[in-house]
Amino acid sequence: MGILVTGGAGYIGSHTCVELLNQGYEVIVLDNFYNSKPESLNRIKQISGKSFKFYEGDILDRELLKKIFADEKVDSVIHFAGLKAVGESVRIPLKYYHNNITGTLILLECMLEANVKNLVFSSSATVYGYKNPAPYFEEMEIGNCTNPYGQTKFMIEQILKDLCNANPDFNMTILRYFNPIGAHVSGLIGEDPSGIPNNLMPFITQVAVGKLKKLNIYGNDYDTPDGTGLRDYIHVVDLGRGHLCALKNLSGYKVYNLGTGKGTSVLELVSALEKVSGKNIPYELVTRREGDIASCYANVDKARKELGFEAEFDIERMCEDSWRWQSENPNGM
Ligand code: NAD
Ligand code: UFG
């Protein structure tokens, strides 16, 4: 089975490619390295011991997509390619709408033309917006996203729903990820942000490794047990496995949360990382970050019942793997 993986050189894509190759899928990666490095592909090969096809290019490049669908035997597409920096999406919204939405539209048009009917799409818990209370259920009304990045995910979900309504033979599964952290146990691939990280875990590990001086904790006055933000962290390898479950169960238009169902606070994550690394993580409590919500965690029943998916790794293991990746690759790839 040939799987076209857009954004396969990125953080979640690379871990998913390893799982796909391990399970004997034929993998074709398309990436423009906007937010990843070619070395990531070598490391996927090193871990899996398998080779795969790679196209360097953009999902906005219609001619390239046509060529890929003509030359390769693609059964399904896993569509990771997208921009994801929340703050930047507020400053430069059109860049996000163009890359994420126009890019997805071009991909879908080329799939239609090539008669490729199966898609797994990377959505985000951010589509639940700021009005729904956690835990989030797939049936909740979505929208009210706090930033243009979130809006692109919300809009693409709607596009995929309309496309499936018009084409009942299409199979499209939307996966709403909660907060992926961790890295492959080999220490060879992991999250490799350029510049100062926006997300909590890479920030913490860069403080622990001495690249950054201290962590700013955005708010300790939230309505949560210790006042800091509560998130549903999921190991990126579990997340990758979730995509295989989704691929095996493709049937019509479906939406699933991929999380653990458990909330962990900022302070709890800091102390878990301190424990596994043996490092002290200096932090300062500062004001809330605009657009943040108090609590975000999943109800995971639907993915368990319908996909047979359950996250295996706990917070300690997530921290161990994130720390191994950071300490063995202090400057990324
Ligand atoms: P990432 O930036 O590491 O990976 C995305 C990959 O897509 C990168 O390799 C990048 O170079 C590539 N890419 C971007 N635009 C492209 C384009 N126009 N053409 C070709 N390649 C392009 O991000 P990630 O964390 O692996 O996220 C993967 C997907 O999951 C994204 O769609 C993201 O929005 C979504 N998601 C991520 C998170 C998270 O916290 N990491 C949470 C929810 C959803
Ligand atoms: N935080 C800090 N200091 C930091 C970074 C984060 O205190 O330097 C806190 C945040 O306030 C929040 C928690 O750590 O309470 C997690 O923050 P992240 O930035 O790691 O993650 P978010 O939940 O804000 O956002 C993530 C992804 C988004 C996605 C969203 C919902 O980055 O792409 O989850 O899925 F939309």
Image: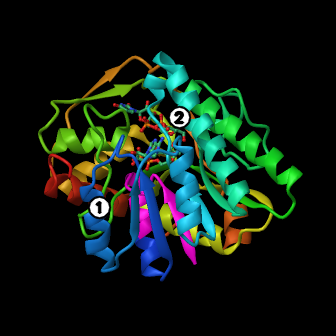
Tell me: 179 left or right of 133: left
Label drawn at residue 99: 2
| Image: magenta residue range | 1-17
Which of the two labelled residues, at mark 1 and mark 2, occupies the earlier sequence position? 2
Mark carried by residue 321: 1
Q: Quadrant of the N terminus?
A: bottom right
- 188, above or below 90, in the image: below
Q: Position of residue 89 (x, y in %)?
A: 49, 24
Q: Secondary structure at mark 1?
A: helix
Q: Is mark 2 within 8 Å of ligand 1?
A: yes
Can residue 127 be seen here? The reply is yes
Q: CA distance from mark 1 to mark 2?
A: 31 Å
Residue found 67% across the figure and 56% down from its top: 111
Q: Position of residue 104 (x, y in %)?
A: 62, 43
Q: Residues within 10 Å of mark 2 (few under 14, many from 20)?
A: some
Which residue corresponds to the image point at 59% horizontal and 69% vertical from the top-left? 74
